[in-house]
Image: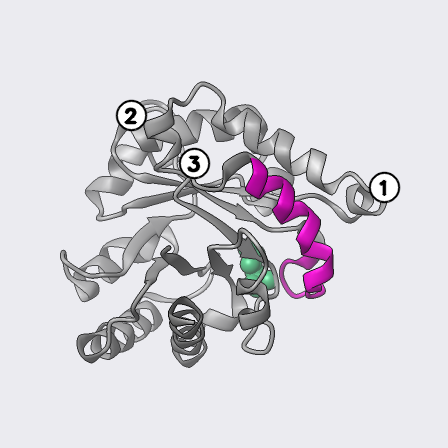
Amino acid sequence: MTLWVGTSWKMTKTLAEARTWATGLRDHLDGWAPEGVQPFVIPSFTATTTVREVLGEDSPVLLGVQNAHWEDAGAWTGEVSVAQAADAGAQIVESGHSERREHFGETVETTRLKVAAALRHGLTPLLCIGESLEVKDAGGSADFILEQAAGALEGLDVEQLAQVVIAYEPIWAIGEHGRPATVAELVEPFAALGEAYTERVAGLLYGGSVNLDNAADLLGIDHVTGLFVGRTAWELPGYLELLRIAEAHAAA
Ligand code: PEP
């Protein structure tokens, strides 16, 4: 089993900062390939080509974009297509992050179109799902995320589904206003996701306030096959430590 460990930089980092982070990662991975771990990084669009150039074409680190439109080209001002993302060196297309659902109108239908577009171009769809605190408090977490996932993955055949990575990121656990989820809170949602998707998708990741103290425990939850990380990985030492934790977990 491969453990996916990646970071989205959200709307952070200048090109110089992106270059420094990527150069440091490239140099570390020159002498150390974390066994059993698939690293990935998802910068802002502006840094896609810079990170690709620094990492090189054959890097073990997969490169992604945080969003991409489902059409290949056209009158979609402000948007970037999957074809353009691939042209810039991306291999992963994230969709459905709760910030995009909340602020930019991302819906189950648009995530479905974006997942399909990524697959059409041979890129890995990284589908984010997650429930609000209200839904969690009402006891509806598992049903809610299963519905989000099923809607976005509707119509995929077995081979297509096997390319998809799902990241479960409860909204209440994400970002500086989130609070870290406990292992106990995640067991039931991952049991539900595991029943539906284990061995059918490429990865079932957890994201939301992952840090160096909770990463090993989170990787120990049944059906979790990776971590999708924000703040803790934005400084390279944090990301490298997460790779080490995952490598140790993969070897155990
Ligand atoms: C996120 O926003 O997707 C995320 C995982 O962020 P953080 O790790 O900073 O909570």
Does residue 189 belong to the magenta stretch?
yes
CA gap, disc 2 and disc 1: 42 Å
Give the residues in magenta.
173-195
**In the picture provided, is 26 more to the left or to the right than 132?**
left
Image quarter (top left, top right, bottom left or bottom right) of the C terminus: bottom left
Front residue of 198/230: it is: 198
Does residue 185 belong to the magenta stretch?
yes
**In the picture provided, is 213 more to the left or to the right than 186?**
left
Along the polypeptide, which appears first: circle 2 or circle 3? 2
Say how the picture is coloured: one colour
Quarter residue 182 falls in: bottom right
The image shows residue 101, relative to residue 243, as above or below, that is above
Q: Disc 2 designates what residue?
A: 73
Q: Residue at x 35, y 24 (%)?
A: 71
- Residue 138 is labelled as 1
**Can you give x and y, in whole percent of width and height, for residue 193 in the image?**
58, 41
Instruction: Answer whether residue 91 is visible to the viewer in this image.
Output: yes
Front residue of 180/223: it is: 223
Q: Residue at x 53, y 43 (%)?
A: 128
Front: mark 2 or 3: 3
Along the polypeptide, which appears first: circle 2 or circle 1? 2
Instruction: Give the residue type at disc 2.
Output: Ala
Instruction: Answer whether residue 177 is visible to the viewer in this image.
Output: no
Q: Disc 3 designates what residue?
A: 200
CA gap, disc 3 and disc 1: 29 Å
**In the picture provided, is 191 more to the left or to the right than 121?**
right
